[in-house]
Image: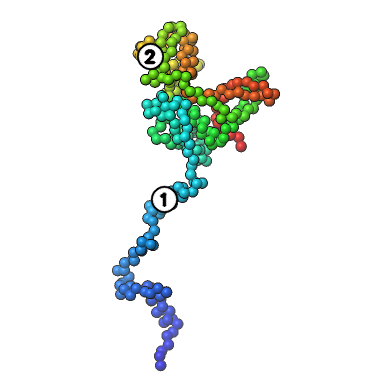
Amino acid sequence: MEKKQSVKEIMNEYNKIKQSGGGGSEKPNPSTYKTPPSERKPQTPTDKTQTPKFKDGGQEEIEKMQKETDPDLLITHEIVKLPSKGMFYQTGLSEVEIEYMTSKDEDLLTTPSLIESGKVIDLLLKRKIKTPNVNIDDLLPGDKSAVILNLRTSSYGPEYHVEVPDPRTGKYIKQKVDLFKLNVNEPSESPDENGHFSVELPKRQKTVKFKLLTSGEEKKTKETADAMKEQYNQEYSEINTTKLKTAIVSIDGKTDRGYINRFVDAMPAWDSTTIKRKMLEVSPGIDLKYTFKASDGFEFEGYLVIGPDFFFPSV
């Protein structure tokens, strides 16, 4: 008579088969039983079962694939035409590619330390301008303003709420400005081969050549004027005089910097005003002159002042 196996013996035998690779619906590999576990080699998957190999667990690549295919994860870009049309840059830069603002950029704009230091707009431009090898300090102020204006309108729309004084009463009235109505000032004439302009002084009868200052040069000029005010304990800043000294490159052919500085210090106001008026005429940028309308229909012209809330419309 055949001896019957106990349940325990049956389970032990079943577990041995399972551990050795047998069991299930697939036919076990006989060589698996003959090879000790320590010497067994894992079977190589076929090409059909191969999966893509990603670095660092694949999260970065997966996110990149999703970003490239999901339109909701793409950040929109736009081309901004510069008012200078590239005539003031050696590279001929006439347009820049910018990236639309996101919620992360609002975090930057609300950082108190950056607002207090005055660096917040420059940092924003560095983040948003995507054209290679563009240094914002090398841009003319008018070109820089054009990029800032485009970032504002593309991110929050053209409406900008301001308060301006009514010229009849002096009282401030609330106005809604349409930023799309601002005009672009193009240079009234082209510079010479060196990027300089000429102007005749009515009082001193001299020919002055000057250049347009870049954003970086204007920044340094202001820092120099502020430092002089503090050093000499002055009640006012010589910012306008310092700008003229920096912008003028020659006077009747004389290029000595010491002579130019002394000439500017002694220059009659008529001549000074003539130079500054010519600078405005040839400077490309955004015309901030705007026509406002009071509640009773009275219209008057004024200049739009860009305040700290320019990038923060009321909600």
Residue at 52 percent of width and 41 percent of height: 103
The reply to whether residue 112 is visible in this rendering is no
**Other residues around mark 1 within 10 Å, as few (<14) / some (14–19) / many (≥20):** some
Q: Nearer the viewer, residue 267 or 84?
A: 84
Up-down relation of residue 252 to residue 154 (above or below): above
Left or right: 42 as drawn, with respect to 292: left
Q: Is residue 102 something that shows in the picture?
A: yes
Amino acid at dot 2 = Ser
Mark 1 / mark 2, whichever is N-terminal: 1
Instruction: Pinpoint residue 234: horizontal percent, then vertical percent.
Output: 48, 16
Q: Amino acid at mark 1?
A: Glu
Q: Secondary structure at mark 2?
A: strand
The image shows residue 257 at horizontal and vertical percentages of: 36, 15
Specify whether 236 is left or right of 175.
left
Question: What residue appears at the point 44 percent right and 31 percent down from the top-left corner?
Answer: 95
C-alpha span from label 1 to label 2: 58 Å
Q: Residue furthest right?
A: 296
Residue named by callout 2: 250
Residue 238 x %, y %: 47, 16
Q: Which residue is mark 1?
A: 61
